Amino acid sequence: MKILAANGANIPALGLGTFRLQGEECTSIVLKALAAGYRHIDTAAFYENESEIGAALRQSKISRDEIFLTTKVWPSEVADGAFQRSVEGSLQRLGLDQVDLLLIHWPPKNSNVKQWARLLCDTVRNGWTRHIGISNFTTGQIDAMVDACDYPIVVNQVENHPYIDQTKIRAKCAEHGMAIMGYCPLGRGQMLLSDSVIAGLAAEYDKSPAQIILRWHVQHEGAGAIPKTASPDRLVENLQVFDFELSAGDMAAMEALTKRHQRLCDYDFSPQWDQP
């Protein structure tokens, strides 16, 4: 497994995304993921599955210190009192005293970056998290948070796949020693998986289209991905991307696909995105 070294954090480059996994299915898949070799699990208060993930951690035979666990605070909770309650609630549901990484899930609509930074940094001071990060932040917002934080930001988690151009975000994260962690790494559907360029590479390397895409992710310096799946077979398949390497020409062919810049996750509360 590739490990991303980011401002003091050592983050497994491939993790399990858990958005929309609920109930016993969630607990079961997390347990199977840990048994298959995953050591990075991603959740959020918004996902309403922290209790199920906590149950999986308790049932697993894997030592807690071997698992890198990420959770997030929803932007409406980024205020004094609400923020602390959100983090304490996440820890209670997970059954933990501390997570490995705490993110602000989306940039809040207000522009009080100093408050966002103070609240996030307080969670390190309180011992609630080992590391802090952000999610869905633009290049300008990354700069502002880095300037305002007393502790290093280790990750910006963003939508990332071969149909979106995140060159600017990738460069900005590298500038600050941060990792970029991609959600929706397979594009949420068959369009990307059936792309002719990716299908051709899958045939050439004797890999699945999903494996080609995930290899593209982890082959970038400082980059990882958190694919979500409810399939035990896909869990294993998604991890099998460290036994081959895409050529420079093949990486460039996939990079050319990002010019389509098809963003999947864009909402009324989204920031004003960087233009490619």
Image (cartoon, grey):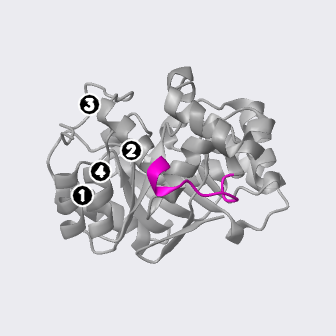
Q: Quadrant of residue 134?
A: bottom left
List x then y, in percent, for residue 216. Answer: 51, 49
Labels 4 and 2: the sequence-earlier one: 4
**Circles 1 and 4: CB atoms closer than 8 Å:** no
List x then y, in percent, for residue 182. Answer: 46, 47
Q: Quadrant of residue 142?
A: bottom left
Question: Label 3, on which residue?
Answer: 269
Residue most toward the bottom?
8
Question: Label 1, on which residue?
Answer: 142
**Kind of element beneath mark 2:** helix
Packing grade of label 3 (10 A; few <14, some 14-19, many >=20) is few
Labels 1 and 4: the sequence-earlier one: 1
**Kind of element beneath mark 1:** helix
Question: Label 2, on which residue?
Answer: 255
Amino acid on which the number 4 mark rests in the picture? Thr
* Region rendered in magenta: 241-250
- Where's the C terminus, which quadrant? top left
Q: CA distance from mark 2 to mark 1?
A: 23 Å
Amino acid on which the number 1 mark rests in the picture? Ile
**Circles 2 and 1: CB atoms closer than 8 Å:** no
Q: Residue at x 26, y 56 (%)?
A: 116
Labels 2 and 1: the sequence-earlier one: 1
Amino acid on which the number 2 mark rests in the picture? Glu
- Camera-nearest residue between 198 and 174: 198
* Mark carried by residue 167: 4
Q: Residue at x 71, y 32 (%)?
A: 230
Vertical side of 202 occupied by 57: above or below: below
Look at discs 1 and 4 and give the one toward the viewer.
4
